[in-house]
Image (tube, rainbow, N blue to C red):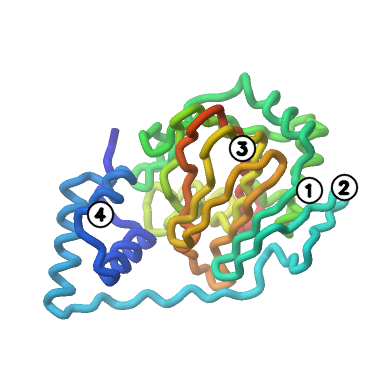
Amino acid sequence: MEKYTHLPDEWDRWLDASVEKDCRPDDILAAMVAANYDSAFAEQAIAARFAQRAAGERRPAAEPYRYGTPRICHQGNLIRTSDRDVRVLVRLNEPVVAVLDNVLSAEECDAVIALARDKLAPSATLSPATGKNQVRETRTSSGAFLPEADSALLRRLNRRIAEITNSPVENGEALHVLHYGVGAEYRPHPDYFEPASPGFAATLRRGGQRVATLIIYLNDVEDAGDTVFPQLGLSVVPKKGAAVYFEYMNEDGQLDAATLHGGAPVGAGEKWVATKWVRQDVFR
């Protein structure tokens, strides 16, 4: 499979931070190779960055991400939607992350799985270079998008999710259901599209940047399969009907690299999740 041979901004900042923290070059290389970077390219990038530091050179510092009022705008313990009260269990403000409970009922979770089960296909990622969907070893789940069509269930869930995320229904991509078997994972990645990558131009024209994500757990996982945020030291354990929400673009268009996240390998059993990605504008 095609290996990455360029550094988007979030990985460029990550490499700078790793060097400044005096991380071992071998550890940095292992992390980049695990994220599907070409090993020779990664070695050269790491060596160049350490050489710059040894020579006393400093790269221009990226402007810090500015946190404003969260889009989710729910500061109490409950989010009251038109048909369900959702409980806030955990809240971070910088970056904006919230763990929510009672997002879906057990029956709704089972119904969503049933809708997706026969539509599953190997999960793909969008190439930042070409814009093509490609199946990679960094993402080993299977998935299916569920357009609303004439489904009363999906219309109800999309409206509820829009109320939870404080965003128009029309700005949400179709609900995306993912299935992970034992050992399946999604290595750490951002959900936003790096604007400088040519392969993302077409999807950015369909509704602008992604600004927030809601991952809903559709079953209780027997072992592992957590949603991990490496830069935060945060690991969210799947719980049927619960969800994790995070947002990563502010009013100035800055993108929050601290929301780098992944799905840890499933240790036993299986994991089902439903993901809603929210765009800046109406998604077409």
Name which quarter of the figure residue 174 lies in. top right
Q: Which residue is mark 4?
A: 27
166 horizontally vs 257: left or right: right
User: Mark 2 sits on what residue?
Assistant: 83
Instruction: Give the amino acid type for the residue marked by disc 2 in the picture.
Output: Asp
| Mark 2 surroundings: few (<14), some (14-19) or many (≥20) residues within 10 A | few
Residue type at the position of mark 3: Val
The spot of residue 280 in percent (x, y) is 61, 58
Residue in the image at 58% along x and 32% along y: 222
Marks 4 and 3 close (CB-CB < 8 Å): no
Q: Which residue is mark 3?
A: 273
Q: Is 27 left or right of 281, judged from the image as shown? A: left
Disc 1 on helix, strand or loop?
Answer: helix
Marked residue nearer the N-terminal end (4 or 3): 4
**In this picture, residue 211 sits left or right of residue 266:** right
Measured as percent of width and height from the top left, residue 186 is found at: 45, 40
Q: Looking at this view, is 132 or 6 the one in front?
A: 6
Count the numbered circles shown: 4
Labels 2, 4: front one = 4
- Depth check, front residue: 248 or 221: 221
Asked whether the viewer can see residue 215, the reply is yes
The answer to which quarter of the image holds residue 138 is top left
As measured in the structure, the alpha-carbon distance from the residue carrying label 3 to the one carrying label 1 is 16 Å
Task: Confirm or deny contact between disc 2 and disc 1 (CB under 8 A).
Answer: yes
Report crowding for label 4: few under 14, some 14 to 19, many 20 or more residues within 10 A (C-alpha). few
Q: Looking at the image, is mark 4 or mark 3 nearer the viewer?
A: 4
The picture places residue 48, in percent across and down from the top left corner, at: 15, 64
User: How far is the residue under mark 2 from the one under mark 4?
Assistant: 48 Å
The residue singled out by tag 1 in the image is 160
Q: Earlier in the sequence, mark 2 or mark 3?
A: 2
